[in-house]
Image (cartoon, helix red, strand yellow):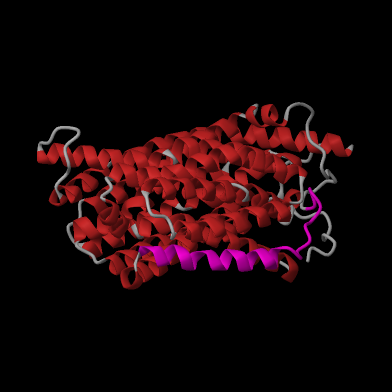
């Protein structure tokens, strides 16, 4: 990896880290916020869902713009908007105003991933792509970890509002660093000259005509339901069930999601690229195997009464679950031409957030309230005594390993369809270039020529 590409990738990683830092502050300050406004877990879940709903809907046009417009301008606009609204969140005085702010943050953050991943697809070839995606997606666990640790510490000492107020500053600074960067040409990392050409027809129908894309969409919904459900309530679970303080819960959540998640992201990217060199469905198989292993580990973690044992096992499970991102994001780029990658990512994110991230927090919160009322033998509308909230949330978490097993089956199905979709794209690209299709090999993923002045 040359220095110019490394610098661009580092900047995109930093933006992604701020992206996840800002969206996760709410989970880090759940308990003081809930007590101040007397909220139920279902309402807390809706605050997470508000973000995901707008993120999903706005992501479709944002993804199309990523294929048609300057990606850095799209990212700069989104970054400045969500950073400003993060600051505004700290000034909110009611559930309704915070809900509205979270909707706006979803609009801003929707521009980040389609544009950034499209950019990375033009910087790195097939057999480098999962590792590059893993570095970019390392922003997910790093951003979440910093959010839990920093926001939890600030909320513990100064109150939850200050956690939002401080968080908006880094995003505004990164906007200024992004503006001077020059983008690579579309298709610069492909083995044949393809540029901005694409297969004829509606871009959305082309994307949705691929069987693997449907598998990936379903997998994203299931995976995001799990991870957003966990991440939204993990600090609250540690506080209620294991008796941790707000600051301890933030630190331990950051350790699990940040430390172990980062290890899984990097290891998953490396294994995915290695598997891809041996078989064209290698990335899908790596993702499926890692999710299969994660299910019994999550179940075992929930059986632990010791906080140390719980953290150790959940950390291992998180490492395995984070293999998913680098491999699935890279697979989308393996089956779509450069001019459709932003659109493909946007369609994937639409389903992943609308059916996964939007339902995960509110679904877990509703299930927690339901289980708590059942444990206390209360009617549906009754207020839940504080001592039963830990029981309800603990029981609700058992849905996670069940969904992980469902996700495993979906990913194994994808490993059966991805080969034909990759070959279909290679055949079209070779014909569009006026050459014969190449069989998969190490040379087909190398960059054609160095891109001119990417910085």
Q: Is residue 392 above or below residue 164?
A: above
Seen from the viewer's position, the closer of residues 333 and 202 is 202
Q: Height in image: 117 above or below 436?
A: below
Quadrant housing residue 213: top right
Residue at image location 63% in from the left, 66% down from the top = 174
Residue in the image at 82% along x and 38% along y: 197
Residue 411, visible in the rendered structure? no
In which image quadrant can residue 281 be found? top right
On whether residue 201 falls in the magenta region, the answer is no
Direction left: furthest residue: 377
Where does the C terminus fall, quadrant-wise?
bottom right
- Depth check: 253 or 329 in front? 253
Residue situated furthest right in the rendering: 434
Q: Is residue 295 left or right of residue 374?
A: right
Q: Is residue 202 above or below residue 15?
A: above
Q: Give the x, y percent position of residue 439.
A: 74, 40
Q: Residue at x 77, y 49 (%)?
A: 190
The percent position of residue 150, horizontal first and vertical second, equals 41, 69
State the residue at coordinates (89%, 37%). Answer: 434
**Is residue 162 shown in magenta?**
yes
**In the rendered image of this protein, does residue 381 appear above or below residue 365?**
above
Task: Point out the stretch of residues depicted in magenta.
Answer: 160-188
Q: Camera-side residue: 233 or 264?
A: 233
The spot of residue 397 in percent (x, y) is 28, 45
The prevailing secondary structure element of the residues shown in magenta is: helix
Q: Quarter of the image holding residue 16?
A: bottom right
The image shows a total of numbered marks equal to 0
Instruction: Point out the image quarter for the N terminus.
Output: bottom right
- Residue 297 lies left or right of residue 204; in this view the side is left
- Between 321 and 70, the one lying in front of the other is 70
**Residue 194: % across, % down:** 83, 43
Q: Is residue 116 visible?
A: yes
């Amino acid at each position: 990896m040359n220095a110019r590409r490394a610098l661009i990738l580092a900047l995109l990683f930093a933006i992604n880290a701020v992206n996840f830092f800002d969206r996760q502050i709410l989970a880090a300050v759940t308990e003081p916020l809930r007590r101040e406004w007397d909220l139920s877990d279902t309402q807390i879940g809706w605050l997470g869902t508000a973000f995901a709903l707008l993120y999903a809907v706005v992501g479709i046009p944002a993804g199309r713009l990523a294929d048609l417009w300057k990606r850095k301008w799209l990212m700069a606009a989104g970054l400045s908007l969500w950073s400003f609204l993060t600051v505004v969140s700290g000034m909110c005085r009611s559930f309704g105003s915070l809900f509205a702010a979270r909707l706006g943050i979803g609009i801003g953050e929707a521009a980040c991933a389609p544009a950034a991943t499209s950019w990375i697809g033009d910087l790195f070839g097939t057999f480098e792509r999962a590792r590059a995606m893993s570095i970019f997606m390392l922003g997910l666990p790093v951003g979440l970890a910093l959010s839990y640790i920093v926001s939890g510490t600030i909320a513990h000492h100064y109150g939850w509002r200050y956690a939002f107020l401080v968080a908006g500053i880094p995003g505004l600074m990164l906007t200024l660093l992004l503006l001077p960067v020059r983008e690579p040409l579309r298709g610069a990392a492909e083995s044949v000259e393809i540029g901005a050409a694409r297969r004829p027809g509606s871009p959305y129908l082309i994307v949705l005509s691929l069987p693997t894309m449907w598998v990936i969409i379903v997998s994203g919904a299931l995976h995001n339901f799990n991870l957003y459900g966990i991440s939204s309530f993990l600090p609250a679970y540690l506080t209620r069930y294991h008796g941790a303080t707000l600051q301890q819960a933030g630190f331990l959540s950051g350790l699990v999601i940040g430390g172990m998640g980062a290890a899984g992201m990097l290891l998953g990217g490396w294994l995915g690229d290695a598997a891809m060199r041996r078989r064209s469905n290698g990335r899908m198989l790596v993702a499926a195997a890692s999710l299969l292993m994660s299910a019994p580990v999550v179940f075992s973690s929930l059986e632990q009464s010791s906080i140390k044992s719980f953290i150790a096992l959940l950390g291992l499970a998180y490492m395995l679950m984070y293999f998913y991102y680098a491999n699935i994001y890279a697979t989308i780029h393996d089956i779509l031409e450069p001019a459709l990658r932003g659109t493909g990512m946007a369609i994937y994110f639409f389903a992943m957030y609308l059916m996964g991230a939007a339902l995960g927090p509110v679904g877990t919160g509703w299930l927690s309230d339901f289980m708590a009322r059942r444990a206390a033998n209360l009617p549906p509308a009754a207020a839940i005594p504080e001592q039963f909230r830990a029981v309800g949330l603990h029981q609700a978490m058992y849905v996670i390993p069940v969904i992980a097993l469902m996700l495993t089956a979906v990913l194994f199905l994808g490993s059966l369809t991805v080969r034909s979709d990759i070959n279909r794209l290679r055949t079209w690209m070779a014909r569009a270039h006026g050459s014969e299709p190449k069989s998969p090999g190490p040379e087909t993923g190398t960059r054609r020529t160095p891109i001119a002045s990417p910085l």
